Amino acid sequence: MSNEMNQQAKKDVSRNWVSTSRFIFYLQVFCIVAFFLGGCYKLYQKRYKGKPDVEIQGSTKYTPEYK
């Protein structure tokens, strides 16, 4: 019976610090990658879509056009 409990204790996260630190490391890596990809996607959605077609009044141009 104690052999069974010993095997369970090796698999338990709270008792095995090596597997716990490995799990926390991979969790951190996953979170950083998820935030990075999410930020890139948000920037892609808000990207510059090109020069807008704006009508400029003729009298305010570099060489004004008067009627």
Image (cartoon, rainbow, N blue to C red):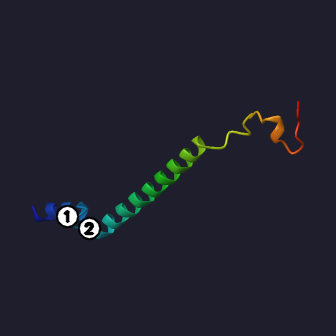
Image quarter (top left, top right, bottom left or bottom right) of the C terminus = top right
Q: Find residue 5 and report its horizontal and vertical position in percent.
A: 14, 62
Q: Find residue 54 and report its horizontal and vertical position in percent.
A: 74, 35
Above or below, 67 against 32 in this view is above
Image quarter (top left, top right, bottom left or bottom right) of the N terminus = bottom left
Q: Is 42 placed left or right of 62 in the picture?
A: left
- Circle 2 crowding by C-alpha within 10 Å: few under 14, some 14–19, many from 20: few
Viewer-proximal residue among 44 and 48: 48
Viewer-proximal residue among 23 and 29: 29
Quarter holding residue 49? top right
Q: Is 16 placed left or right of 34 in the picture?
A: left
Q: Find residue 52 and report its horizontal and vertical position in percent.
A: 72, 36
Q: Amino acid at mark 2?
A: Asn
Which residue is depicted at the point 66% across and 43% down?
48
Viewer-proximal residue among 21 and 2: 21
Quarter holding residue 55? top right
Q: Report the number of numbered marks.
A: 2
- Circle 1 crowding by C-alpha within 10 Å: few under 14, some 14–19, many from 20: few
Q: Quick check: marks 1 and 2 in contact, CB under 8 Å?
A: yes
View extreme (top): residue:
67
Above or below, 19 against 46 in this view is below
Q: Is 32 placed left or right of 13 in the picture?
A: right
SS category of the residue bearing label 2: loop
Q: Amino acid at mark 1?
A: Ala
Q: Earlier in the sequence, mark 1 or mark 2?
A: 1
Q: Find residue 14 and report its horizontal and vertical position in percent.
A: 22, 64
Q: Which residue is mark 1?
A: 9
Q: Which residue is mark 2?
A: 16
SS category of the residue bearing label 1: helix
